[in-house]
């Protein structure tokens, strides 16, 4: 067995694997760790992008409030419920509801939506709705939500503040929110972008340490992709000193290190990664630590408007062809299609009494 598999990965080792000319042992160790702790199943999550309105001004993201080049939408509660029903019919075990940070969508509406989905289907519900009030997050948990995704984007607080301005009268503290979410029983997910202008090797290594400290259930990692309608996408000039390349290969390195740092987490092969390599990006990610993929089932008429960055591809699971194609790609690697809710192995271990997880296949 690969020695890396058992190593604790101190800072120097993280830096080594981020920069070495020979990453092959890293791929192998991450794949072994994935097989050992998470098994051979790849879980499919149905992603619904329920709205692209956002009050934030993040310097990297196309949904930022200041972007006038985007036609905004909010799906109606009926449209979302209808999509969730369809996800259950397609055989998904989880639905992910994602949007910009949009306080105009009331906490009550989201809670009612979760209750409706839970009453009609056996779906696990993952939320990815940005930084909301603790009372709202608690209300949604109470309504039956299972998981919450909130990326910390970068562990460097100065870089984070510069790309993610706080709202007036409210300092962002995503780490504190993640602790809160865990304390009230959510499975928690976080992660970062690779190659943000101004991100250094040290801070990227620190990101991986932070994943471990948070002991996450889910880890999303994608390359930074410049969006011309954002301040970071308009930056020209020479690369900053010690700039991390926002490449496909660098993303695999970070993903593989995340698997070694958090072996029992669920780790998706992300859309941003597949955008850089639509041909076999997902396959390579599945062989380098990933065990989840999130096919997009957002209605066609809205999908093009959820433009975080240009060229965004999505595995399409709304057509039979799209769904069969991703399943074929998974099976061709000798892997299985995950059944049931697919909670993280970490969460299953911590709460064996959780009924959802008893049904999971891994
Ligand atoms: N490039 C890559 N990823 C991005 N995200 C937002 N904008 C970009 C971009 N330009 C990611 C962020 C966010 C997630 C929903 O999408 O990490 O948390």
Image (spheres, rainbow, N blue to C red):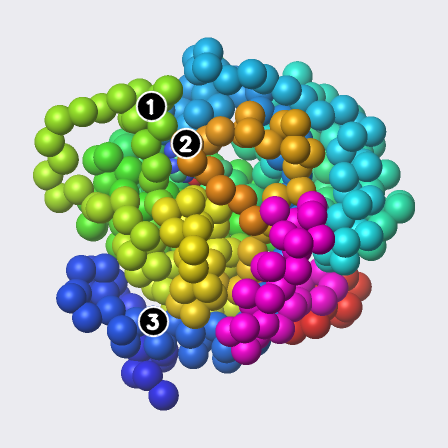
Q: Residue at x 37, y 20 (%)?
A: 229
Give the quarter of the image for residue 171.
top left
Horizontal and vertical percent position of residue 26: 30, 71
Q: Residue at x 36, y 88 (%)?
A: 1
- Mark 2 touching mark 3, by CB under 8 A? no
Camera-side mark, 3 or 1: 1
Mark found first going from the N terminus, 3 or 1: 3
Q: Residue at x 33, y 23 (%)?
A: 228
For ligand 1, the image quadrant comes to: top left
Whether the residue carrying mark 3 lies under 8 Å from ligand 1 is answered with no
State the mark number for residue 27. 3
Classify 10 Å Cα crowding around label 3: few (below 14), some (14-19), many (20 and above).
many
Give the spatial CA distance, label 2 vs label 1. Answer: 8 Å
Is residue 158 shown left or right of residue 236? right
Position above or below: 28 against 137: below
Give the spatial CA distance, label 3 vs label 1. Answer: 33 Å
Say which of 28 and 248 sits in front: 248
Horizontal and vertical percent position of residue 50: 66, 31
Residue occupied by mark 2? 310
Say which of 124 and 47 sits in front: 47
Position above or below: 328 against 187: below
- Mark 3 touching mark 1, by CB under 8 A? no
Position above or below: 357 against 39: above
Question: Which residues lie in the magenta part?
Answer: 316-343
Q: Residue at x 82, y 44 (%)?
A: 85
Is residue 35 shown left or right of residue 22? right
State the mark number for residue 228. 1
């Amino acid at each position: 067995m690969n020695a890396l598999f058992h190593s604790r990965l101190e800072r120097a080792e993280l830096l080594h694997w981020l920069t070495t000319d020979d990453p092959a042992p890293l791929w192998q160790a991450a794949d072994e760790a994935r097989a050992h702790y998470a098994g051979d199943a790849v879980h499919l999550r149905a992603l619904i992008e329920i709205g692209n309105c956002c009050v934030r001004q993040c310097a990297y993201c196309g949904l930022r409030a200041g972007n006038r080049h985007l036609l905004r939408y909010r799906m109606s509660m009926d449209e979302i419920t209808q999509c969730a029903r369809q996800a259950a019919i397609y055989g998904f075990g989880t639905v992910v509801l994602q949007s910009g940070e949009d306080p105009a969508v009331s906490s009550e509406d989201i809670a009612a939506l979760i209750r409706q989905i839970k009453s009609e289907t056996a779906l696990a519900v993952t939320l990815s709705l940005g930084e909301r009030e603790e009372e709202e997050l608690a209300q949604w948990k109470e309504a039956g939500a299972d998981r919450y995704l909130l990326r910390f984007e970068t562990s460097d607080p100065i870089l984070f503040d510069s790309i993610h301005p706080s709202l007036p009268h409210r300092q962002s503290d995503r780490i504190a929110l993640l602790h809160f979410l865990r304390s009230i029983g959510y499975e928690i997910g976080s992660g970062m972008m690779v190659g943000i202008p101004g991100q250094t090797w040290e801070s990227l290594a620190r990101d991986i340490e932070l994943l471990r400290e948070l002991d996450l259930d889910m880890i999303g990692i994608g390359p930074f992709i410049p969006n011309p309608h954002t301040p970071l996408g308009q930056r020209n000039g020479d690369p900053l000193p010690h700039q991390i390349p926002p490449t496909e290969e660098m993303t695999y390195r970070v993903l593989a290190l995340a698997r070694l740092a958090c072996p029992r987490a669920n780790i998706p092969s992300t859309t941003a990664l597949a955008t850089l390599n639509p041909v076999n990006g997902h396959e390579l990610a599945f062989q380098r630590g990933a065990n989840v993929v999130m096919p997009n089932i957002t209605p066609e008429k809205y999908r093009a408007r959820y433009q975080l960055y240009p060229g965004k591809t999505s595995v399409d699971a709304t057509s039979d062809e799209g769904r069969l194609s991703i399943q074929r790609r998974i099976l061709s690697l000798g892997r299985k299609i995950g059944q049931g809710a697919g909670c993280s192995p970490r969460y299953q271990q911590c709460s064996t009494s959780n009924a959802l997880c008893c049904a999971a296949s891994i």
